[in-house]
């Protein structure tokens, strides 16, 4: 039993109104795995880095129950690098630089022991690669979830449409849901996505919370109103990691349990944004998580007798 | 015992992506009172209209337990008129025309029987007039709530700062909270407002729900994810009317009851946007409201054992 995560392991340079980091560890698989490792082990990462990527980080991953045999290390090449800048409205950002490096010809190869995962989370990579990952599986996981972004809708729509028919859960933000469906309203967009393949869709709205749609059911999870948001980088991936980690830990895929998983995902996202990069995910202790989830419960608890 | 509402009673012309109305009944006091009348009677409106305002509408108000003796009718003058256009993003709108007409020299005079209201809601009018209303009261109401807007922050800041020290609850949207405090983050903005007078602040975020702050307590009420939003005009006022109507009906001003009141306010706003102008508020039946509040309860209900 394991959680398989496919995505990027990379370097980020981040600037926000509250500070700056020149070169820190980033990437979707990094945030997803670090977040999920607070719930479940083992987590297998399938990714690619250059020989510039610190061995120390990989061994830190291992200590948290995250295996790294699936991370290809390309000798003499450089890791994927992204630089971005956030403004006061932390919901939007400018990309300052994207160096694909090793990611340019990434071909995910699943080591034998990773071909029967319990659950699979496909981070935001080329949908053609997401398909290639699914095709290498020897058994169908209990749950396959995926992320994607506008870029792939623009340049790889047929592959994206295909992978959507192969997964159970799509996790996107509101803008992505709009572009994917051509529907401005979130409810209409969600309904259209539910007809395109995934039986469950999660639409993230950043500081405005997240919506879970399944059949005719809908659940809304608020985001915690935070006094200080230092760096939103990785919040969406931390959310997805918390969601999948909690489902892996608890096993149930009922709507009721998915609602709980979304609260845990939201809690992980709320931690992520409180410090730069994945710093907070690395230092997080169980009592802090428990306290945070209690805050989420209190935040929208209301007793009304009808 | 009564709920006193001071605000505009007017004509609106509205254009949304889904339709158009050339001249319908509008105004903050209209939406507030129609919404609140689903919970509580009597409601007294203090406002001003021209002789062009239909007697039929005033008598419709009366039938709903809304008194209109406090609405001055200026002979030979025209009622306040606002024309606006919404785009796909219903959170923003363009004002196409504002004819102040009778509003230009409005001087609210409270009839004798309205000077001891149980609760008072000051709609979005000149803060100098809001002060003048409070000064005419013979007893301090159990609760005074107020709305305002960016315009008054620009041109009447000293009066606005003064009226803030005279009220219990400020109800504003996120943009207004930002401009009022100079704080971008909603939590910081709310804390600053709580230091400026009101002991309670409600920050409305349109389709993203609403936040209630009081001391160190915070409550988040989601907005209902709606498939069809025809016309957002009056949603904020319907929210405020539902909030004050529910508090007037139930009497308790505890934080717990304010949370319930915000859910009822949100329910009223969700109805308001489903049809043009105040149409839906006029046709609403009790079972619909009950069903809607149940939807709100279900929307964010989650059971987590920690």
Image (tube, coloured by chain):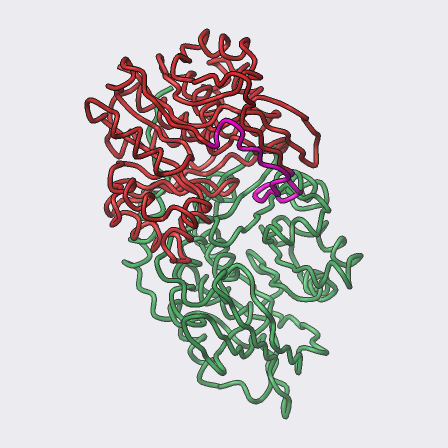
Chain colours: A red, B green
- In this view, which residue lies farthest toward the bottom? B76
Q: Quadrant of residue B184?
A: top right
Q: Name the residue rendered at 76%, 54% in the picture.
A: B162
Q: Quadrant of residue A162?
A: top left
Quarter holding the C terminus of chain B is top left
- In this view, which residue lies farthest toward the front? A76
Residue A298 in sight here: no
Q: Name the residue rendered at 24%, 37% in the picture.
A: A166
Location of residue A169 with respect to B96 vertically, above or below: above
> Which of the two residues, B253 or B172, is positioned nearer the viewer here?
B172
Location of residue A144 with respect to B101 vertically, above or below: above
Q: Position of residue B291 (x, y in %)?
A: 29, 53
Q: Position of residue B37 (x, y in %)?
A: 43, 64
Q: Is residue B69 left or right of residue B246?
A: right
Does the magenta segment cover residue A90? yes
Number of numbered discs on residues: 0
Location of residue A272 with respect to B15 vertically, above or below: above
Q: Name the residue rendered at 39%, 72% in the picture.
A: B279
Q: Position of residue A232 (x, y in %)?
A: 57, 34
The span picked out in magenta is: A85-104
- In this view, which residue lies farthest toward the left? A139
Residue B63 in sight here: yes
Does the magenta segment cover residue B276? no
Q: Position of residue B57 (x, y in %)?
A: 46, 81
> Which of the two residues, B102 or B134, is positioned nearer the viewer here?
B102
Q: Is residue A44 left or right of residue B6?
A: left
């Amino acid at each position: 039993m394991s959680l398989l995560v496919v995505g990027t392991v990379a370097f980020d340079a981040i600037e926000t109104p509250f500070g700056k980091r020149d070169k820190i560890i980033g990437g979707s698989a990094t945030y997803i795995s670090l977040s999920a490792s607070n719930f479940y082990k083992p987590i297998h990462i399938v990714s690619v880095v250059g020989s510039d990527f610190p061995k120390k980080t990989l061994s830190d991953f291992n200590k948290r129950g995250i295996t790294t045999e699936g991370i290809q290390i390309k000798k003499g090449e450089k890791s994927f690098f992204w630089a971005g800048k956030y403004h006061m409205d932390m919901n939007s950002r400018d990309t300052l630089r994207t160096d694909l490096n090793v990611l340019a010809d990434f071909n995910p190869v699943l080591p034998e022991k990773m071909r029967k995962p319990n659950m699979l989370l496909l981070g935001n990579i080329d949908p053609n690669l997401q398909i290639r990952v699914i095709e290498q599986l020897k058994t169908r996981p209990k749950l396959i979830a995926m992320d994607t972004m506008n870029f792939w809708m623009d340049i790889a729509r047929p592959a994206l449409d295909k992978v959507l028919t192969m997964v159970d859960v799509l996790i996107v933000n509101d803008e992505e849901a709009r572009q994917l469906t051509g529907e401005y309203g979130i409810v209409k967009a969600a309904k259209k996505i539910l007809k395109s393949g995934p039986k469950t869709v999660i639409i993230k709205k950043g500081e405005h919370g997240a919506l879970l749609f399944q059949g005719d059911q809908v659940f809304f999870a608020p985001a915690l109103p935070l006094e200080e948001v230092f760096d939103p980088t990785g919040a969406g991936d931390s959310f997805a990691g918390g969601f999948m980690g909690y489902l892996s830990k608890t096993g149930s895929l009922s709507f009721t349990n998915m609602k709980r998983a979304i609260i845990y995902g939201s809690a992980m996202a709320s931690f992520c944004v409180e410090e730069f990069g994945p710093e907070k995910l690395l230092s997080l202790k169980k009592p802090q998580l428990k306290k945070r989830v209690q805050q989420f419960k209190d935040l929208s608890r209301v007793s009304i007798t009808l």
